[in-house]
Image (spheres, rainbow, N blue to C red):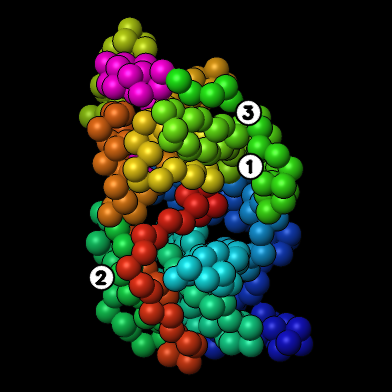
């Protein structure tokens, strides 16, 4: 396999002089530049960066990053992270396709994306994952239409769930009264035992301290989760504001400071947020879930953070609980299964989709 892979890496594109390869440490600086210089557009333009080392940010997980170079410049990149996850209640090898970035100098070159998928497909043919999935922002209609059309050379994208990512301010406000009512009897914050952490050993080397795990019990209901601040190796950075937001920012920040709300960061500064990860809470454990998030907010506030980030399948009843208890900003996306004709397809049952947001 190694010889075949090497031949593929060195074979130049016949017509457009584009070369595809598996990324190595030699590509680190160019990959970080690609992420930094090609943010997601919007009223607040954000770049999802992986400083100071692209490859170290994958938390020890098996991954494969594909790069495309044209005239020596990194034109396009995307990666697949492989982990063991439960699919239909059974442990399976799952590949998450993410980080697809096209350099702005090659805007509109969807042929690069198509050929990149073909290259990745060839690499996977000998040892494919049991299941592949990805996520696309709900407001990125262009990408959704492009990928759902089933064009030649692209895998099949099938929607499997709508997903909601919440950005929760850690500062207290009026809506916290509801949370305080339910958080009257939480247990003190404690670290999990070593037995619970065996599968997290790589993560513990990435600013994932034992004391970040919190267990609460309220009137017989229990819930647990961890707080994971990833800014040391993975950042969400503000790259620009729309003209209206830019002009209003000084006034918005003045008002935010007066009422204890997070301020809009300066351009080039990362969002001060951490992920709520490894959440365990039954849909019926409403009091424990709210108490847990209240404890996590207090912990995050003590660490100087502004937001917590967590995500739910749009069908998850816990999403309704969190929406009612806390005022959050919401970002909507759609999860897709990704499948090629010559790879076995997995038909999903009606269980909720619960990808770990911190690992996407």
Q: Which quarter of the picture shows residue 94?
A: bottom right
- Residue at 42 percent of width and 75 percent of height: 338
Q: Earlier in the sequence, mark 3 or mark 1?
A: 3
On the image, the x and y values in percent for residue 322 come to: 32, 36
Q: Nearer the viewer, residue 193 or 17?
A: 193
Q: Earlier in the sequence, mark 3 or mark 2?
A: 2
Give neighbour class at mark 1: few <14, some 14-19, many 20+ (Cα, 10 Å): some
Q: Dots 3 and 1: beta carbons under 8 Å?
A: no
Q: Dots 3 and 2: beta carbons under 8 Å?
A: no
Q: Dots 2 and 1: beta carbons under 8 Å?
A: no
**Residue extent of the magenta highlight:** 165-184
Give neighbour class at mark 3: few <14, some 14-19, many 20+ (Cα, 10 Å): some
**Residue denoted by label 1:** 233
- Residue at 29 percent of width and 47 percent of height: 317
Q: CA distance from mark 3 to mark 1?
A: 25 Å
Q: Is residue 200 left or right of residue 274?
A: right
**Residue denoted by label 3:** 190
**Residue denoted by label 2:** 145
On the image, the x and y values in percent for residue 7 come to: 70, 87
Q: CA distance from mark 2 to mark 1?
A: 33 Å
- Residue at 49 percent of width and 45 percent of height: 280
SS at circle 2:
helix
SS at circle 3:
loop
Q: Is residue 309 left or right of residue 3?
A: left
Q: CA distance from mark 3 to mark 2?
A: 47 Å
SS at circle 1:
loop
Q: Nearer the viewer, mark 3 or mark 2?
A: 3
Q: Is residue 140 above or below residue 21?
A: above
Q: Which quarter of the picture shows residue 25?
A: bottom right
Q: Is residue 351 magenta?
A: no
Q: Is residue 358 above or below residue 14?
A: above
């Amino acid at each position: 396999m190694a010889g075949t892979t090497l031949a593929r890496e060195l074979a130049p594109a016949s017509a457009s002089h584009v070369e595809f390869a598996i990324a190595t440490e030699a590509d680190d600086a160019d990959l970080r530049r690609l992420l930094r210089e090609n943010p997601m557009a919007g009223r607040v333009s954000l770049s999802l960066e992986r400083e100071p080392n692209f490859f170290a940010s994958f938390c020890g997980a098996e991954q494969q990053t594909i790069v495309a170079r044209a005239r020596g410049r990194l034109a396009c990149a995307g990666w697949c992270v492989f982990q063991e996850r439960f699919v239909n209640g059974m442990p399976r090898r799952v590949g998450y396709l993410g980080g697809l970035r096209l350099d702005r100098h090659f805007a509109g070159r969807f042929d690069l994306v198509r050929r990149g998928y073909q290259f990745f497909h060839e690499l996977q043919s000998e040892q494919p994952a049991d299941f592949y999935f990805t996520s696309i922002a709900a407001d990125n209609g262009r990408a959704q239409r492009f990928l759902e059309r089933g064009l030649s050379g692209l895998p099949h994208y099938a929607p499997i769930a709508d997903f909601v990512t919440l950005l929760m301010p850690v500062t207290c406000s009026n809506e916290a009264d509801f949370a305080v009512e339910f958080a009257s009897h939480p247990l003190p914050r404690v670290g999990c035992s070593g037995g619970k952490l065996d599968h997290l050993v790589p993560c513990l080397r990435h600013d994932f301290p034992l004391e970040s795990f919190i267990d609460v019990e309220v009137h017989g209901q229990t819930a647990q989760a961890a707080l994971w601040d990833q800014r040391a190796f993975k950042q969400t950075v503000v790259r620009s504001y729309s003209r209206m937001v830019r002009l209003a920012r000084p006034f918005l920040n003045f008002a935010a400071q007066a009422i204890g709300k997070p301020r809009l960061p300066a351009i080039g500064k990362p969002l001060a947020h951490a992920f709520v990860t490894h959440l365990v809470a039954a849909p019926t454990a409403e009091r424990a879930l709210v108490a847990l998030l209240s404890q996590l907010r207090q912990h995050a506030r003590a660490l100087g953070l502004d937001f917590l980030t967590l995500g739910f399948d749009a069908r998850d009843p816990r999403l309704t609980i969190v929406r009612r208890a806390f005022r959050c900003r919401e970002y909507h996306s759609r999860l897709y299964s990704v499948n090629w004709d010559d790879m076995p397809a997995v038909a999903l049952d009606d269980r909720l989709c619960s990808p770990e947001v911190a690992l996407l």
